[in-house]
Amino acid sequence: MSEKIYTAGLVVIGDEILSGRTHDKNIAQVASWLQVQNIRLDEVRVVADVQERIVEAVNALRARNDYLFTTGGIGPTHDDITVDAVAEALGVGVVIHPDARAILERYYSDKGGLNDARLRMARVPDGAELIPNQKTGAPGIKIGNIHLMAGVPHITAGMLDALTGSLEGGAPLLSETVGGFIPESEVSTLLREVEKAHENCQLGSYPFFREGKVGSNFVIRSTDADALQSCMHVLCEGLGELGFDFTPGGI
């Protein structure tokens, strides 16, 4: 396991997401899966079914992350243009992958056969590999550090399962939480000073409203276990000195 922090970007593709017609679930499940792989989701973009917008997002996020994932736009219809956009971003052509075609021929053998629309799901950027799909046959696609996956969440989940353990990850991101009925505005100076004194840690503040009272949970994240514990100790000590009751683990 490397001490390097590996990051990933995610491009969520589809007019239906931007219109609110479909509620995205892939951001959360991709982020959770990446955490288990010791990879940090660094940025997400949601883009319309417009090829130049997809190309722009793909090029931006793949350049500054170790991995890029896309969800949506690899189906059988005219607006499924992710393959074309990724191929354009990479400067390669689009081809029919022979293994993908064979998979689809088997899958649709008792469902009316492989027509032109269904054959679109065998199209890949030239040089790509396949990501298995046990749900509907139509495979995901891997090329370089880019992974193209379905937009339907349970199909995406299956593709992620197929990728489990295949990507190189870095140091795991550790976390500690402390919380209480503490208005974050009253401890903002403390939070800033504690984070500044622990440059290997990230300190987030998450307010809540319960029982008619205002509170906050403070989450510390780091790849350095010793730095994490030091930051936790200093934060708790500071909260106590300010007269606040707090609960390790959060509330």
Image: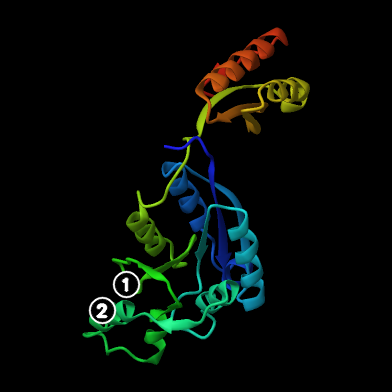
Instruction: Give how far across and how far down residue 164 sits, in percent.
Output: 35, 51
Give the residue drawn at x 66%, y 9%: 240
Q: Nearer the viewer, residue 90 or 244?
A: 90
Q: Nearer the viewer, residue 44 or 130?
A: 130
Image quarter hosting the C terminus: top right
Are discs 1 and 2 less than 8 Å apart at CB?
yes
Amino acid at pointer 1: Thr
Give the residue drawn at x 38%, y 69%: 129
Quadrant in the rendering for residue 115: bottom left
Residue 108, numbered circle: none
For numbered disc 2, what is the local secondary structure?
helix
Q: Nearer the viewer, residue 38 or 206?
A: 38
Instruction: Give how far across and how far down residue 21 sits, in percent.
Output: 57, 69
Give the residue drawn at x 59%, y 72%: 89
For numbered disc 1, what is the local secondary structure?
loop
Instruction: Give how far across and how far down residue 112 sits, in percent.
Output: 27, 90
Name the residue beneath numbered marker 1: 136
Give the residue drawn at x 54%, y 82%: 79
Q: How is the image coloured?
A: rainbow
Name the residue beneath numbered marker 2: 107
Quadrant in the rendering for residue 152: bottom left
Q: Is residue 221 above or below residue 17?
A: above
Amino acid at pointer 2: Tyr
Query: Cα distance, mark 1 to mark 2?
Result: 8 Å
